[in-house]
Amino acid sequence: MTVESIVFYVFATLTVVGALGVISMKNAVQAVLCLVLTFFSAAALWMLLEAEFLAVTLVLVYVGAVMVLFLFVVMMLDVDYASLRAGFSKYLPLGVITALALFGAIYWVIRSQVLGEIPEPAKNSADYSNVTVLGRLLYTDYFYAFEIAGVILLVAIIAAISLTFRGRRERRGQSVPLQHQTMREERLKIVSMESGRRQDAHLKPKKTSSKKEAPKDGVAKKSSSKKEPSKNKQDEAEKSEGKGS
Amino acid sequence: MPYNLMHLLPEIFLLTAGCVILLVDVFSKDLDRNLTYRLTQLALLATAIICMVQFPSVQYHLYERHFILDPMAGIIKISVIFLAMLALLFARPYILPRRILRGEYYLLHLFAVLGMMVLVSGGSLLTLYLGLELLSLSLYALVAMQRHSYRAAEAAVKYFVMGAIASGFLLYGMSLVYGVTQHIHLTDIANYIATNDASLTLRFGLVFIVVAIGFKFGAVPFQMWVPDVYDGAPTSTTAFLSSAPKVAAFGFMVRIFAYGFIGALVDWQGLLIILACLSMLIGNIVALVQNNLKRLLAYSAIAHMGYFLLGALTGTSEGFAASFFYILAYSIMSLGGFGCLIYLGKGVEDVKNLDQLKGLGRSNPWGGLLISVLFLSMAGLPPFIGFWAKLEVFLAVLNAGFVWLAVFAAVMSIIGLFYYLKVVKVIFFDESEKEEKIVAVRGLRLGLGITSLSVVALGLFPGKLMQLCAQAFEYL
């Protein structure tokens, strides 16, 4: 039992435990965190296979980007997991039988044919660098596949945005500097009108005219705040109509 | 070592055009997206011209044998581009009133065509998978474009989930094949199979690959997505989905079976026989009871895939040529069939039921005639192209020695005659329940005319196309 095999068994067990945890946890956030554990353990296994670039990329991309997005969605959406899992125990025996059958078939095929005949891959020399080898191949022999993979990412972006983007929300906001820069002429228009009889003159006792002068100034100051001109004129006309009596 | 990228010119041009049109679309202020549509059609036409100019006369294996350029790939690329152009012609009047009008709708067709071109030229398992994924991703988004409709969203989720599972199966099979043969290039795999026995693991991996191919075609028992997706997706997307990707999937199938695994013929032939028989059976019988036109066409698509697989399962170059002719004929007919449904739709209402076609022959004789031509051709009646396609496929199966299979297929074909003739009967011999005149835009009439005319013309003169299909398989 070398150190290497101990490390392998530990991380392989962690991978399986994490994968089982993903499908059996009731709490969705805990399930996502189990998936993160699975990915970390798989990265450690890849490190054992001397694919250190792939291991680091797995952690950075899968755990760092994809799993974080998973967590966002799981935490933001209020999914009623209890009702979704309602039929779980009903189908559990059938699911277990199918899984065991498939696993048994794959295990039988691989065990009978491949294992025991293929030797372990030879260890590379000390100055082997996974990054260098990958980089050298990816941009020369496999450039076509690399470019197509880039186009697939572009299509994913186009698809995601075209399906969910709903345009800029039109909001009415205020711009205080603009409000401070207004001038009296744009807000106020003084109209001279003939005064007539008050509409409710038969209801109220007659008031002196000096009291009616003061509110008019107050009304004028009020209308200097941000209002449309038509509304202003309407206000003005209303006030002057009410005033004319 | 510097590679000569001239052979990649169609793909490079299409990708560049796609990116440029994407930018133009972002800054375009036209709500109708006229500019995007015209530029897309122009880009497709230019790519087709480049493909025709660069049409290869021999087979090239390029870029470390990741890219195969041969007559079959050339023919499939050109036909896929023309099918996409026709589908866009049908799509435009459909999406205008339904407010699915975003420029990305046209762009995703461009990227789907690019995916198909990559798929058909794939020389290694890696490039085949990448092309398939590029195509599938564009199609998932196209199905989901009508995002306010529940049915479209449901159809998109079903298509996406089952497509992802199928891609997973494909990758698993490819990884098993790689594990056994230690090669990903198709010619290397063929050499390995020729020199060693096909081991159990290799056959196991092959089964997974066949499963994925069966899913992509919609063959039974992987056909569950076909009726729901064909029914729920916007009709213009269904028209594109049922025509061009099937031709590209045929190219994919030929690369895998004829170039990679031809030595393991006995392994995948039995699987394809089962797929073909079940598809013909289920597709024809379930279509008999359908009232919804889109589902009727969906189940007839499943049945057609059964007939189409008959030619491919023989493994001879005559069989592959017959299947090639069949899939080209079927894609034209299917595009025309769904184009008819778009043509008949009024405003934002889709034509759903068979009853809505009643009396069409009287109120709109030209439209009724075109629809009847397409349906009769799908039934396999002469003098339309569907007849020649079925004849070629049956001949190939008979020459390969599967007499019982040919008889079974002929019986299924007769059963299938019923629902096609039912549609023609409803159009011409039933009284219409309401008096409404159909007014269609010029683009729709042009597109419908092109498909029906080609169905009739190729039915009367199928020789040139058949010769072209046979030529594509000289290198087998």
Image (tube, coloured by chain):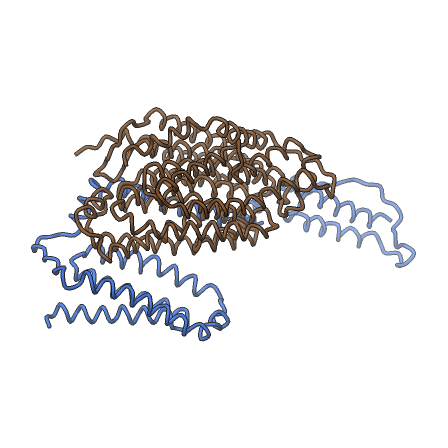
Pinpoint residue B64: horizontal percent, then vertical percent: 21, 38
Relative to B62, is B288 above or below?
Answer: below
- Residue nearer the viewer, A152 or B85: B85
Q: Position of residue A104 (x, y in %)?
A: 29, 68
User: Can I make out residue A230 in this image?
Assistant: yes
Image quadrant containing the C terminus of chain B: top left
Answer with left or right where residue A135 lies relative to residue B209.
Answer: left
Asked if residue A220 is positioned above or below residue B25 in the image, the reply reads below
Side of B278 relative to B2 (left or right): right
Total labels drawn: 0
Q: Position of residue A6 (x, y in %)?
A: 15, 71
| Residue shown at 42% from the left, 30% from the top | B43
Front-most of residues B97 and B55:
B55
Chain seen in brown:
B
Q: Which chain is blue?
A: A
Give the x, y percent position of residue A189: 71, 40
Residue that protrudes farthest toward the top in the picture: B53
Residue B119, quarter of the rendered image: top left
Residue at the (36%, 28%) spot, across then down: B51
Q: Is residue A173 visible?
A: no
Above or below for B223 versus A140: below
Image point (64%, 35%), residue name: B368
Looking at the picture, does residue B157 appear above or below residue A194?
Answer: below
Q: Quadrant location of the N terminus of chain B?
A: top left
Residue lying farthest right?
A202
Compare residues B9 and A211 and report the one nearer the observer. B9
Of the pair A226 and B451, the residue shown nearer to us:
B451
